[in-house]
Amino acid sequence: MTDLRMTRRTFLKATGALGTVAAVGVGGRRLLQSQPLAKALAAQAEEVKIIPTYCHGCAATAVNCAVLVHVKDGKMVRIEGNPDAGNNWGVGSTSLCAKAHTAVQYEYSPNRILYPMKRTGAKGEGKFVRITWEEAMSTIVSKLKEAKEKYGPESYCHLVSEFYPPRDQVARRFLNLYGTPNYCECCLCHGPRYLAATVTIGFCSESTDDWNNSKLIVNWGSNCENSAVNQGQPHALLNAIANGVKYVDIRPMMDPLASKADQWIPIRPGTDCALALAILNVIIGEGLYDADFVRDWCYGFDRLAEHVKQYTPEWAAPITGIPADVIANLAREMATTKPMVIKTGNGVGDQQRDGTSAMAAICLIEAITGNLDVPGGNYAGDNMPSMIPLRNFMVETLLDRLPSDAYDKLLAPSYPRFLQKMPQVISPVGFHTPQSASYKVLEAVLTGKPYTPRVISAQQTSVLSQLRNPKMVSEALKKVDFFFVMDQYWSPAVDYADIVLPACSLYEHGHNSFFLGVKNRPDGTWIGMRNKVVEPMGESRSDWEFWLDLGARMGFAADMWGGDIERFMQEQLEPAGIKLEDLRNSPRGIFVKRTEPLPPREYRRYAQLFKNLPHGKVQCYNELIGGKPDADETGTLPYMPEYKGPPEGIAQTPDLAKEYPLIFSDVHAYRLDQHSSYTGLPYLRELQPYPWVKINPETAKKYGIGNGEWMKVESPHGWVKMVAEYFEGIPPDVLMSKRGWWQKCDELGLPGYSCLDGGSEVNVLYNGDREKFDKCSCQMAKQTLVRISKL
Amino acid sequence: MAKQYGFWIEIDRCVECYACEVACKAEHNVDLGIKWRRVTNVWSGSFPNVTFKTISLSCMHCEKPACEAVCPTGAIKKQPDTGAVTVDQTKCIGCHYCFFACPFGVPQYGKSGAMEKCNLCVERLAKGQEPKCVSTCPGNALHFGTMEELSKMAQEKAAKKLAASTQPSVIVSK
């Protein structure tokens, strides 16, 4: 091996020689603990107060890392990981992602909403005046009472970002007491993948516990280095790679983990279902499946075998952009390398027209190759002793208070009604109360079908940068009788609100529902308090506080803890025998040691895993959902995975491709923002100053577009302006971008961009026809065709 | 000889997440536009036979710092107990000599005009903590220790110490 000579130029050019220096060799590696150093330097220690809490970085999701916040003179100064909590790779880990470290900029951002406001100009115009909380709340109360009386309680719809359990549980409780089933989810994330897996193989495991026993890990659409880099999966995957596992990465773009793969398979966005079906075709056609498992634990295998005969690798090749021999070899490798695990993520199953089928087909690959719940396979996770008893773990939503016909009154079921009527039988996620799809609810404002929503509220969700067809969304927000928003930042949708409420950051209140952050570990349960770190900015209040207050004002005080947040929290802790006071007085959290021993690791728990499935078996032929009405109730769900493909694509709409020759999609999550938010934070924005679109240099040059130059991206549905980022790790006929460029960053003098035509919001490019959405989960497809030109 | 502390970056564990770069800026309140630590990709090949490696680099804290040697005011000092190369901004006159002398282009100049760069988090070291970039690394790719310790760890991975006449205190390995 040659010496690596570092020179100024190579450093500045980021060392082109690095590719040659890296020696092969897998070695043990261990975090080096810091050594106590010269005492002379200790004098520099600052006077800071260290307050443990949870990170706000992934604000609206169920992902919260335990942190220690440093506060000086009442102001947040920095943040670090709490080593006691067991973040990322476990106890001792102090790691945090880039977003976490912008906590101070988040907290003190000039873009925060600080006071209740009411609209004075036209909807969307952005003219508002400051009002009191009293005026804001009494206006909301009177509108809610009026709507209930005039149009019935179901005319009130509440929009949320997906999975923010603590707040949503309190919100759901309020909705149930009010009498509306229309809790509206954005239909973007996780749920559909979870649903497809649970109705096919009975479980959806995200367990990394057994990856070191794997021989082959196939990352299929998991973007974990972007969406949850500090949640254990990337770390576990890196360990497995160091351990010698073969790693295959199936994603349209070469993301960082793909660069470490033995094989990267760039798949055209939204065509995963075709690939999965072709893999089933090869495995079954060549007899490479696990005959014993299929005989004992699969229902309807023969029908599946017949069904997938049509989906040959030659058929899938032009759809997926993957050569037929690559597909066939991948199928053989997946069938014969044992154990094998497919790690799925939000890039597959979500935001695809046939996402439910794609995920079901992937689960069937794992099943028929004998890789379910085996060592090193799709392991269903350790039998952990139960957590210390918290009240139901989640807040009781008082579902029984809803009228008995609530499910029938759902405005636009986000999952088929029949599935929603089976609470928690199939999946512990998603069916605590009925839910509608945000997109379709907004459509109903314009169409009046099946009925007209009259009051809409949105909480920490930016519908104009989240849902397809922002133009339709803006029209709906203009038309709805009354729209109120509670948020931290002024997203473009807020311009349409009648009343705006300022929400606290998670550093400004100590309000828990104890759903998040509790770490169930083999040795016990760690529970920490979300502590108040600093005073709320302006007149902002916590989301929890808002619902309790609204509940009390609406006459539900008795069921909303009398509006007392302390009572709400204490009540949840009672079964665990922990007092709120004790938790507050234990700044490092409370650790409850396990009294019973950890059960030994078990595999092949099929009777238990498949117990809710018809015949107690894997559903190759799905009798649970097949033939039942779809979410739109205009057709039925398939018994077996069916390919539909992107609404527009080179293979799907060849005539359109003559005019719009390039495939366009966007990443589900990106490591420098929280979905559509955070481009206003200086330390993150300086790493991605302009709305980027990743483009193969060969393609860009063909259109005369230089690296870093503005370009026009035009689809049959709308156009945006974006900045070309030359990127070798993407096929020449595919462009990838990300949504959410509405936030300005004053510190850097960078603007926010409009969410409508001519702005930089990718949602304007996609097809908004609900017929082109997934019929089981209402997932809105995010693939289209575009033409580009230099701006 | 006194101990020389440094970094070891295992590039096959780095996932280009920028946590180190942003954590460093937040820890030291670094001006916008200035980077004490920098994450960069090195690409090779072209589609479809393409790959890249990500590397995170800061000041090399050389055993024989060229910047210190040329500094006319004595603002740059190699700390005897840690080997950290630090700059006393009150003494710096912003002459940029260090910038031209450093083989790695490390020295930068923010609003104050004085040179600034990675200081190995000496204030954290004094408290027995690792540099912030190391403590925050989600991939566990970035390590801190004495060069002896790091060499020993890296040897198992057949690492190669960066070679230059200034003897950088950074190991880069797969």
Image: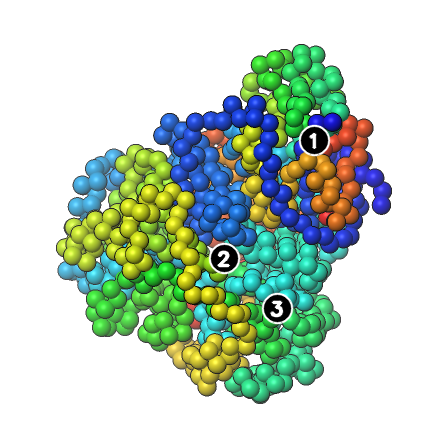
Circle 1 sits in a helix, a strand or a loop, which is it?
loop
Measured as percent of width and height from the top left, residue A587 is found at 38, 42
Q: Is residue A210 left or right of residue A597?
A: right
| Place of residue A760 in the rendered image (x, y in percent of width and height, measured from the top left) | 50, 45
Q: Amino acid at mark 3?
A: Gly
Which element carries disc 3, helix, strand or loop? loop
In the image, what residue occupies the spot 26% across and 66% down? A399
The circle drawn on residue A376 is: 3
Label ID, residue A668 = none
Chain of residue at mark 2: A
Query: At 60% from the left edge and 27% from the top edge, which residue is drawn?
Result: A38
**On the picture, is A572 further left or further right than A178?**
right
In the image, A329 versus A698, the foreground residue is A329
Residue A131 in view here: yes
Q: Is residue B128 left or right of residue B85?
A: left
Q: Residues within 10 Å of mark 3 (few under 14, many from 20)?
A: many
Residue A190 versus residue A37 in the image, above or below? below
Q: CA distance from mark 1 to mark 2?
A: 56 Å
The residue that mark 1 highlights is: B4
- Spatial separation of the CA atoms under disc 1 and disc 3: 42 Å
Q: Give the amino acid type for the residue marked by disc 1 in the picture.
A: Gln
The subunit letter for the residue under badge 3 reads A
